[in-house]
Image (cartoon, rainbow, N blue to C red):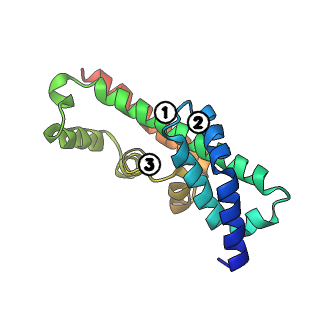
């Protein structure tokens, strides 16, 4: 990063962090997670500095980036919640913590083809972003999201049938 870019980003950060934090908190309905979303947005700004510098209005670019970061966080929370609901639907002997987490993963592994199991573990458990996983698999982000959603639906249905 060049010195002028670094100075520009630092000024943008100092002048707008609090505003962006309030904006993210309003969208997330979670003031504690808002700083994380803003930090992630500034990380993206660092990675896409040329795009930010060429933007007609850096503040609008930053606000859109924060909004998309928040939407991504909300999607991830939703998927995690959906996945956790399927775990909570298990019988008590399977849902006890620690030692039975491996049993649950083994059960999920047995219900899914290996590539589907790996996809769900990567995105839901390890937190790999959809964009990164989609690029790795050579598919669109939307297709990756839908595939994970369908796999989770299948797991939830299969696990409920065993109760």
**Which residue is at the front of the view, 44 or 7?**
7
Task: Tell me the tag on residue 133.
Answer: none
Residue 162, located in which quarter of the rendered image?
A: top left
Instruction: Name the secondary structure under disc 1.
Output: helix
Residue 114: % across, % down = 34, 51
Q: Residue furthest bottom?
A: 2
The residue positioned 51% from the left and 48% from the top of the image is: 36
Residue 160: % across, % down = 31, 22
Residue annotated with mark 2: 25
The disc, 1 or 3, on the residue closer to the chain's N-terminal end is 1
Instruction: Decide if residue 26 is on the left or right side of residue 127.
Output: right
Q: Residues within 10 Å of mark 2 (few under 14, many from 20)?
A: some
The residue positioned 42% from the left and 30% from the top of the image is: 82
Is 52 situated above or below 30?
below
The residue positioned 30% from the left and 39% from the top of the image is: 111
Give me the C-alpha separation between circle 1 and circle 3: 12 Å
Instruction: Name the secondary structure under disc 3.
Output: helix
Give me the C-alpha separation between circle 2 and circle 3: 24 Å
In the rendered image, the quadrant that contains the C terminus is top left
> Are the two marked residues, 1 and 2, in contact with CB atoms closer than 8 angstroms?
no
Residue annotated with mark 3: 123
Residue annotated with mark 1: 78
The residue positioned 50% from the left and 52% from the top of the image is: 129
Instruction: Name the secondary structure under disc 2.
Output: helix
């Amino acid at each position: 990063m060049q010195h002028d870019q670094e100075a520009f980003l630092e000024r943008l950060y100092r002048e707008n962090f609090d505003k962006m934090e309030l904006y993210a908190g309003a969208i997330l309905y979670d003031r504690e997670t808002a700083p994380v979303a803003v930090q992630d947005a500034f990380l993206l700004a660092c990675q896409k500095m040329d795009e930010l510098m060429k933007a007609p209005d850096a503040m609008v670019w930053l606000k859109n980036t924060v909004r998309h970061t928040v939407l991504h966080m909300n999607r991830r929370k939703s998927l995690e919640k959906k996945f956790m609901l399927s775990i909570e639907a298990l019988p008590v002997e399977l849902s006890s913590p620690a030692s039975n987490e491996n049993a649950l993963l083994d059960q999920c592994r047995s219900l899914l083809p290996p590539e589907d199991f790996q996809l769900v573990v990567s995105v839901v458990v390890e937190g790999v972003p959809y964009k990164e996983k989609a690029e790795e698999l050579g598919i669109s982000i939307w297709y990756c999201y839908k595939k994970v959603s369908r796999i989770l639906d299948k797991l939830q249905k299969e696990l409920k049938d065993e109760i």
